[in-house]
Image (spheres, rainbow, N blue to C red):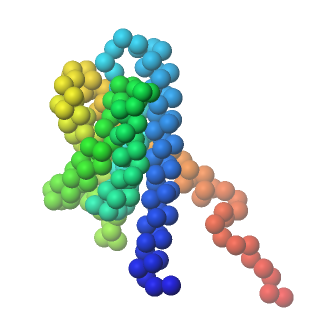
Amino acid sequence: MCTSNVLRITFLIETMIFSTVYFALHALDLSITLVLVGELLPNTDVASPIFLPHGLSVLVVWLYGLKSIPLLLLSAIWMQSWLSDSIGFGSISGHNPLLSLVAIPLVFIAARKLGLRVTSAVTGFNWGHIMISGFVAGAFCAYLTSLMNGHSLEHFASLALGAIVGQIVFFALLLLGYRLLRLSPRPIFTSAKTDPA
């Protein structure tokens, strides 16, 4: 099999994995938002309090850079079309997936130009820089979304806070899963050793 076919297959597999996780996080976000905002704060201009897909987007942008755009494009288009359907997800969540798809890589490029270590290259990276860049990207996306839709300052603050909290929770869950894998008594991804004798 030639290298280009392997790269295409790898790209399709990565796209399917990230899209599936993206959809699952949006569904979880919708259920959290319906409970927290719909029940507790029904008459306010508050968006999603824990927007987990932002954390996934930051992770994918950190790993792939501008290549993250085609990886998440199909799921963002589908989520954007879901925003305008009869379910009213857009009025519940308030976030704009297509906007964040472009804005987050731009913030990471700007962070790199400012000297922050936000690449996943061999030269090293700094988790603090990555998290801060993700926070800035979340606030930037919230600002652009509020500006485009003409929402209040309260809505902007809730969008930005939801993206930041979602990123923190997503990376905390990722770290917890990694720790649990490391602490498991048997390695999960290795084959069992056989005795040659």
Query: What's the residue at 47%, 69% (across, down)?
Result: 10
**In this rendering, is residue 38 above or below 26?**
above
Query: What's the residue at 45%, 18% (across, down)?
Result: 38
Q: Among all residues in the image, which is located at the extreme top?
A: 43
Query: What's the residue at 49%, 57% (across, down)?
Result: 16
Q: Among all residues in the image, which is located at the extreme front?
A: 86
Q: Is residue 48 visible?
A: no
Residue 122's image quarter? bottom left
Residue 182's image quarter? bottom right
Q: Is residue 97 visible?
A: yes
127 or 192, which lies in front? 192
109 or 5, which lies in front? 5
42 or 90, which lies in front? 90
Query: Which quarter of the figure is the C terminus placed in?
Result: bottom right
Residue 80's image quarter? top left
Query: What's the residue at 25%, 50% (across, down)?
Result: 102
